[in-house]
Amino acid sequence: MSENLHANYQGVWDSRIGFGDKAALISIDFMQGYTDKASSLFAQGVVDAVEASPQLLKAARETGIPVIHTNILYHESFIDGGVWLKKAPVMKAMVAGNPFAEFCPQVAPQKGELVLTKQYASAFFGTSLASTLHTLGVDTVIIIGCSTSGCIRASAVDAMQHGFRSIVVRECVGDRHPEPHEANLFDIDSKYGDVVSKAQVIDYLQSQN
């Protein structure tokens, strides 16, 4: 991002919201289709994010905050894919039995952790995520996963619209190309939540013990 662009936003779209009283970690769509070079969905940025995330997941689990995962899975007829599958037919790989629809082992859900299945970009759209978080007393969502310009951005925006503080962990989200990745992190940080480093989030989590 250019210095002129940052200067144009400074003092207008750069407020910080910080962490609230209770956080949950939401791991969005860390599936093998994004990390396997044989897949049309492959994104090196997601490979990097997967490699960066186990340490953060470990810290969240040790702190005892809720850890919730999402995946994308369609009916074999794709009747539940709507217009998105017309726009992005590559997503048809996300069906039961396709290895690309399986979680990456390094960041897979552990026993007892909630997995919500979705068919669209936002982790909140068409799922019980908002109701679950409100019931748990959560006011802050720490977001990791993929892809930055798609499901991460949509989830960060919807989190804010459902009344949650969105904290997106820079090293733990990824995309196909660095330019949309950086542009969307900039926009999320400017308008919808805080984009912070993994070290900052781990420091926060450890302070809760």
Image (tube, grey):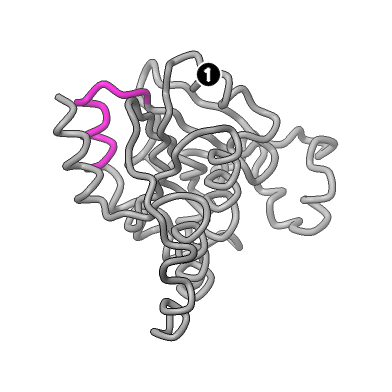
Left or right of 197 on screen, residue 172: right
- Residue 31 in view of the camera: yes
Q: Is residue 28 above or below residue 135?
A: below
Question: Which residue is found at the position 83% from the left and 36% from the top?
Answer: 77
Q: How many marks?
A: 1
Quadrant of residue 58 within the rendered picture:
top left
Q: Nearer the viewer, residue 36 or 198?
A: 198
Q: Point out residue 197 in the picture as x, y percentages from the top left corner.
A: 27, 55
Left or right of 116 on screen, residue 145: left
Label 1 residue SS = helix
Q: Is residue 64 magenta?
A: yes
Question: Which residue is found at the position 35% from the left and 57% from the top?
Answer: 170
Q: Which residues are magenta?
A: 55-66
Q: Which residue is mark 1?
A: 132
Estimate how packed mark 1 is, as few (under 14), some (14 to 19) or many (20 or more) residues with alpha carbons within 10 Å. few
Q: Is residue 196 above or below residue 57?
A: below
Q: Point out residue 31 in the picture as x, y percentages from the top left corner.
A: 50, 45
Q: In the picture, which quadrant includes the N terminus?
A: bottom left
Disc 1 marks a residue whose amino acid type is Thr
Q: Main secondary structure of the magenta part?
A: helix
Q: Point out residue 37 in the picture as x, y percentages from the top left corner.
A: 48, 63
Q: Is residue 90 magenta?
A: no
Q: Nearer the viewer, residue 179 or 183?
A: 183
Q: Point out residue 144 in the picture as x, y percentages from the top left corner.
A: 41, 46
